[in-house]
Image (cartoon, helix red, strand yellow):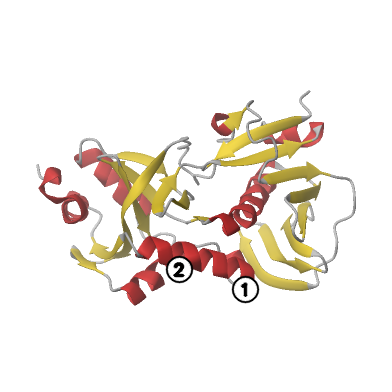
Amino acid sequence: MKNEQNYLIAGFRLRAEGDKLTAAMATLQGFKVFATDSREGNEPLIRLVATDEEAPAFSQEMYRSTVDDVTSRFGRYEDGYCFASDYADGRGIRMWNPQDTNVFYLSHDLDPRLLRFTCWIAFGIGIAPHDAVAIHTSVLTYQGKAVLFLGESGTGKSTHTRLWREYIPGAALLNDDSPIVRIHDGVPYAYGSPWSGKTPCYKTERYPLAACVRLSQAPYNKMERLSIPRAYAALHPSCPPDFAYDDALYDHISRVLNALLGSVTVYHLACLPDEAAARLSCTTIFGQSCAE
């Protein structure tokens, strides 16, 4: 049994340590393609360490959410960040990250569903100071560039990206739920990740961002370019809500968004779930190359 496993996600190294944790990580859909045996750079950005120690108590709960039968809490304890996620029957996982370290301790139940989300939280904390953030979006690639489609759950992000793939030759899905946006040498890139929601799309690829599109449902198709303030307001709700109430994490995320807005156009698309909507957004972003 392996004592550690490295993963390379968006150019960042995450390491799972300990037999129990590496075995649990091996069961998570999507992570296998990001696994690497290379130890280049040696020290990972994020170390996940399973422990039998009791998790520290929350001193401040910043965010709580319930999805189906799982309630999750994010906040701080006296020496760093902490996270808890529990099923209604009492089974749960705990994570804590001592201040100014790259170690994220995991304890209790390493259930796959809970572990997957906890890894997302740990990864988000770890990458935030390095000009990167996970954004809730469905992202397509076309002509060597990426387009983020954002919106509230149920808006039709996955439907719209499916229509692109059906009607626009060369369009492909990079991730359907939580790609990583990273500013590299001043350029915003979208990276594939192990977190892709209900659509299994796990790719170790990156593309420069061409545009971001906030979707809303309407009985017509209309697309408009947003001003910088409206563009920021369109992007912000799709960033991790758990981190919005911590000043340090929010400052890091704001820096990423500001850098993105400095070079990438953001649009609002009010649309029907039809071919015309896909062609409208493609033509607006890429020009006549999307025409039939």
Q: Are marks 2 and 1 in contact (CB under 8 Å)?
A: no
| First-in-chain label (2 vs 1) | 2
Reply above or below: 279 against 242: above
CA neighbours of label 1 inside 10 A, class few (<14), some (14 to 19), many (20+): few
Query: In which quarter of the view is residue 30 placed?
Result: top right
Q: Is residue 28 visible?
A: no
Which numbered tag is attached to residue 219?
Answer: none
Q: Residue at x 60, y 30 (%)?
A: 35
Residue at 63% from the left image edge and 69% from the top image edge: 248
How far is mark 2 from mark 1, CA to CA?
Answer: 15 Å
In the picture of the structure, the residue carrying the numbered disc 2 is: 236
13 displayed left or right of 171? right
**Residue at far top of view:** 1
Residue 182: percent from left, percent from top: 47, 52
Dot 1 corresponds to which residue?
A: 247
Find residue 89 and report its horizontal and vertical position in percent.
77, 55
Three-letter amino acid code of the residue under disc 2: His
Three-letter residue code for mark 1: Asp
Q: Nearer the viewer, residue 149 or 209?
A: 209
Q: Residue at x 36, y 65 (%)?
A: 261
The residue shown at (35%, 64%) is 262
**Quadrant of residue 33 in the image?**
top right
Q: Residues within 10 Å of mark 2 (few under 14, many from 20)?
A: some
Q: Residue furthest right?
A: 53
Element under disc 1:
helix
In-front residue for pair 132/25: 132
Quadrant holding the N terminus:
top right
Please tell me whether mark 2 sits on a helix, a strand or a loop.
Answer: helix
Image position, residue 210 (x, y; %): 29, 52
Picture coordinates of residue 27, whole percent (x, y): 66, 32
